Image (tube, rainbow, N blue to C red):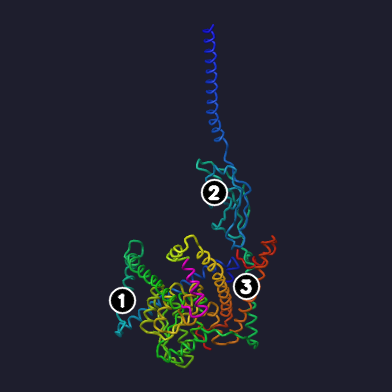
């Protein structure tokens, strides 16, 4: 009996193992078959194109671009790039004008568009296997030029308001209205500096900065130069102008020559006192420092835009004992000039110099206009801070309108 | 410029005008070069005391011009070698003088004789303790676990200093607008050498 029982148990165990083994083999076969089937399904499924292609004229441009948007392909993970095709006909003649990578749904076409011509677009999804899928044709669309950039409408309003205030004040001055201008120490010292140089018999050095004639600070500097040149011509004080920009040097010569003619001393004009040095920053600084150490001017004017060389110039000028008057709109260099120079015109004081020195009513009127604009800005900042605080604190988004007014896109 | 900023079709016209401006400015460069040559030539002929500087200027100008014209200005040329090994180090030398000039200017400006100068001195000390490596090192020797100078200097730079800069920039912008209007309207003509 025990032998029979042993044989029976052995048979049952063996059959069980055989069943388990056959089940496992069947499972493996199913798994191996599944990817093959899946692979077959993947290769059969065609690449799907993008949808909802929308072509429209790019806003606020000069009529030379069109903007495209689309929904990316549902098979974007199989796409390697989208090719933008364009044609003047809806059915034929599509040529590639650009490509964008996968997962991109925008494109701006600026490729030789002709204003007024109708264009049709389609987007082709492609991949490395050579599969491609074209979207439906979108169009027609024409590039059109806009005559006003609406992104800048608030800036235009601000320009009109501020410009209008300044023009109003200028013409008020023309009608005889008098304006009070506060004392500016640096400008009051100009005559003192010229007088000092005349008494000591030493020249005056005038620098117009390191920017070109198109820069507003250079123009302001040239305005001051005309006043200084007249005084030096009257007193026969040498005026040295080492130039950084050759164009500015030409203008400087004309100004100084005109000043000598105006005071009736054209023969005292020396063209060699106004010369070009270099348009390299540190070469210019080296040359001017050398001039300061050799010529030992009694007065030095730094009027214009300066960079890192401001302290190099001002300290050298200080070492030769010259009275130094600086004026710049380079806010980063103002601390250096303030530390090294006797008088400094800060920012807008440089622009006010011409009006201050000449006392012409029209020029003084523009200064008043500036002051009114500044007052308007201060009021706007004050109310803007309050409105923005309420907008953020209480979620009142309509209160952002002052900030929007002064924000460029 | 106003038109091209607000009216998009004028942008291409603005680009053309910029090109014209560059073309027109080239003869001015010739005038500047002529002025430079005339100045140094006169000094050499008259044997002024500073004549050696003028001879050096001539040699440098002619050498660089010839090397550029004959050998080109690309990589591996003599022009490029001279620029990299002579001009650039000289520029760096001039720039490095700034450190000493800053120290000299600071020594003069930060003497605590007036209230304003004392405030400037205190502010400079606080900012240097935070921003200069040796200041940082010295502070942490005294108070290793404190970053008070960084906090205070950050506040100084981001609040009162930034406010002052923005105010100055606002004033500069308005001044530039007013000056531009005066020039456009022909009220300001001094820069053209016009008489009173």
Which of discs 1 and 2 lies nearer the camera? The answer is 1
User: Would you say A369 lies left or right of A79 here?
Assistant: right
Please provide percent x and percent y for residue B121.
Answer: 48, 74
Q: Which residue is mark 2?
A: A83
Please provide percent x and percent y for residue A15.
Answer: 54, 15
Describe the element under mark 1 as helix, strand or loop: helix
Residue nearer the viewer, A74 or B149: B149
Q: Are marks 1 and 2 on the same chain?
A: no
Q: Are marks 2 and 3 on the same chain?
A: yes
Please tell me how crowded label 2 is: few (under 14), some (14-19), or many (20+) other residues with Cα within 10 Å: many
Describe the element under mark 3 as helix, strand or loop: helix
Residue nearer the viewer, A39 or B107: B107
Which residue corresponds to the image point at 58% horizontal and 48% vertical from the top-left? A123
Please provide percent x and percent y for residue A229.
Answer: 47, 87
Q: Which residue is mark 1?
A: B56
Say whether residue B125 is magenta. yes
Q: Which residue is mark 3?
A: A159
Let me know if residue A220 appears in the view. Answer: no
Of all chains, the one bearing label 3 is A
User: Would you say A278 lies left or right of A176 here?
Assistant: left
Please tell me how crowded label 3 is: few (under 14), some (14-19), or many (20+) other residues with Cα within 10 Å: some
Describe the element under mark 2 as helix, strand or loop: strand
Disc 2 to disc 3, C-alpha distance = 43 Å
Of all chains, the one bearing label 1 is B
Residue nearer the viewer, A73 or A123: A73
Mark 2 / mark 3, whichever is N-terminal = 2
Say whether residue A172 is magenta. no
- Residue range highlighted in magenta: B111-129
Residue lying farthest to the top in this orientation: A1
* Quadrant of residue B54 within the rendered picture: bottom left
Please provide percent x and percent y for residue A247.
Answer: 45, 77
The number of numbered discs placed on residues in the rendered structure image is 3
């Amino acid at each position: 009996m025990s032998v029979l029982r042993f044989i029976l148990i052995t048979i049952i165990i063996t059959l069980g193992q055989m069943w388990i083994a056959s089940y496992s083999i069947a499972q493996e076969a199913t798994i191996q078959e599944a990817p093959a089937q899946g692979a077959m399904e993947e290769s059969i499924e065609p690449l799907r194109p993008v949808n909802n292609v929308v072509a429209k004229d790019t806003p606020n441009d000069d009529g030379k671009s069109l903007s495209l948007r689309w929904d990316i392909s549902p098979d974007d993970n199989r796409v390697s790039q989208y090719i933008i095709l364009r044609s003047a006909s809806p059915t034929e003649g599509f040529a590639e004008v650009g490509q964008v990578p996968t997962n991109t749904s925008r494109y701006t076409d600026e490729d030789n568009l002709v204003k007024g011509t109708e264009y049709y677009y389609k987007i082709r999804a492609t991949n490395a296997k050579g599969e491609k899928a074209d979207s439906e044709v979108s169009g027609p669309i024409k590039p059109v030029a806009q005559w006003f950039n609406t992104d800048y409408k608030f800036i235009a309003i601000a320009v009109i308001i501020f410009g209008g205030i300044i023009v109003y004040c200028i013409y008020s001055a023309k009608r005889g209205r008098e304006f009070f201008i506060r004392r500016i120490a640096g400008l009051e010292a100009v005559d003192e500096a010229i007088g000092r140089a005349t008494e000591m018999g030493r020249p005056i050095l005038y620098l117009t900065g390191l920017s070109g004639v198109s820069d507003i600070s250079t123009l302001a500097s040239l305005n001051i130069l005309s006043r200084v040149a007249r005084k030096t011509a009257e007193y026969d004080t040498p005026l040295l102008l080492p130039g950084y920009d050759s164009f500015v040097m030409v203008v400087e010569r004309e100004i100084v020559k005109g000043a000598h003619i105006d005071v009736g001393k054209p023969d005292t004009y020396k063209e060699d006192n106004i010369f070009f040095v270099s348009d390299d920053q540190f070469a210019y600084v080296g040359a001017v420092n050398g001039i300061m150490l050799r010529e030992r001017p009694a007065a030095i004017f730094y009027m214009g835009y300066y960079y890192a060389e401001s302290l190099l110039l001002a300290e050298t000028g200080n070492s030769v004992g010259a009275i130094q008057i600086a004026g710049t709109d380079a806010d980063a260099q103002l601390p250096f000039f303030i530390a090294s120079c006797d008088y400094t015109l800060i920012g807008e004081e440089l622009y006010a110099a011409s009006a201050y020195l000449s006392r012409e009513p029209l020029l003084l009127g523009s200064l008043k206009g500036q002051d009114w604009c500044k007052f308007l800005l201060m009021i706007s900042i004050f109310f803007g801070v309050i409105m923005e605080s309420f907008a953020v604190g209480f979620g009142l988004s309509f209160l952002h309108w002052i900030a929007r007014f002064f924000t460029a896109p | 410029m106003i038109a091209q900023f607000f009216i998009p079709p004028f942008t291409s016209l603005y680009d053309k005008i910029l090109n014209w401006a560059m073309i027109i400015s080239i003869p001015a460069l010739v005038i500047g070069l002529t002025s430079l040559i005339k100045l140094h030539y006169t000094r050499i002929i008259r044997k002024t005391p500073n004549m050696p500087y003028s001879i050096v200027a001539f040699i440098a100008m002619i050498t660089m011009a010839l090397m550029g014209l004959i050998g080109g200005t690309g990589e591996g040329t003599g022009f490029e070698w001279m620029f990299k090994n002579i001009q650039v180090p000289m520029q760096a030398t001039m720039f490095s003088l700034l450190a000493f000039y800053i120290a000299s200017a600071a020594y003069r400006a930060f003497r605590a004789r007036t209230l304003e100068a004392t405030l400037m001195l205190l502010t400079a000390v606080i900012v240097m303790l935070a921003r200069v490596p040796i200041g940082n090192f010295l502070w942490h020797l005294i108070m290793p676990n404190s970053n008070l100078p960084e906090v205070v200097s950050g506040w100084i730079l981001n609040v009162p200093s930034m406010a002052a800069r923005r105010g100055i920039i606002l004033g500069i912008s308005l001044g530039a607008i007013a000056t531009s209007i005066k020039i456009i309207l022909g009220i300001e003509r001094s820069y053209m050498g016009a008489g009173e």
